[in-house]
Amino acid sequence: MNTTIRDARKEDMPAVLELIKELAAFEKEPDAVITTVETLEKEGFGAQPLFHVFVAEVDGKIEGMALVYYRFSTWKGRTLHLEDLIVREEKRGTGLGNALYRKVIEYARSQDLKRVEWVVLDWNKHAIDFYERSGATILKDWYTVQMDEDGMTQYVKSAK
């Protein structure tokens, strides 16, 4: 297996979107993805990119990806958020995910960042076990909080 982990290019975004949709299906949210190739191209490759993507190629085909972006912690300073790390189902267990994970951690170290953080679903035991074995800390006393577009609209209307 000839594997390469590299920075994504704009022309890789159709394959990246396929992987995002595959992850959504794996996470039991197959209809949740509304982003488009055009959005990924615009937001990731414009004058001020909002994210960075690494892709994993096997024999010239993109089989995995990791999307990251900078955050700022008032306690730590500049940090990195790993939004998604995805490997096609048929390539899981081949070391591709580990290679992408290593690339993300190496990237954070090369940027002198103070922390890498991400979210994992509580039922994804395989991923949780991997992260714990790698030395990551699972913060079980924190909740992820989100407000979608409808929630924001309703809140703004009601808070007047």
Image (tube, rainbow, N blue to C red):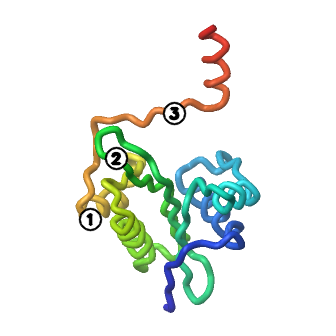
Instruction: Decide which of 82, 90 is in the foreground and name it.
Output: 82
Residue at far front of view: 47
The residues bearing labels 3 and 2 have C-alpha atoms spaced at a distance of 22 Å
Query: Seen in the image, is 36 located left or right of residue 145?
Result: right
The mark closer to the camera, 1 or 2, is 2
Amino acid type, label 2: Gly
Amino acid type, label 3: Gln
Q: Which of the marked residues, 3 or 1, is nearer the chain's N terminus?
A: 1
The residues bearing labels 1 and 2 have C-alpha atoms spaced at a distance of 23 Å
Q: Residue 64 carries which label?
A: none
Q: How crowded is mark 1: few (under 14 residues within 10 Å), some or many (20 or more)?
A: few
Q: Residue 134 carries which label?
A: 1
The mark closer to the camera, 3 or 2, is 2
Amino acid type, label 1: Ser
Q: In the rendering, at what x and y percent does residue 61 appear?
A: 62, 82
Quarter the C terminus occupies: top right
Tag 2 residue: 77
Whether 132 is drawn above or below 154: the answer is below
Label 2, secondary structure: give it.
strand
Label 1, secondary structure: give it.
helix
Residue occupying image coordinates x 65% and y 45%: 32
The residues bearing labels 3 and 1 have C-alpha atoms spaced at a distance of 28 Å
Whether 92 is drawn above or below 4: the answer is above
Residue occupying image coordinates x 68% and y 67%: 13
Tag 3 residue: 146
Q: In the rendering, at what x and y percent does residue 38 appear?
A: 76, 58
Q: Which of the marked residues, 1 or 2, is nearer the chain's N terminus?
A: 2
Query: Seen in the image, is 24 located left or right of residue 105?
Result: right
Residue 12, by quadrant, is bottom right
Whether the residues at callouts 3 and 1 have beta carbons within 8 Å, the answer is: no
Label 3, secondary structure: give it.
loop
Q: Which of the marked residues, 3 or 2, is nearer the chain's N terminus?
A: 2
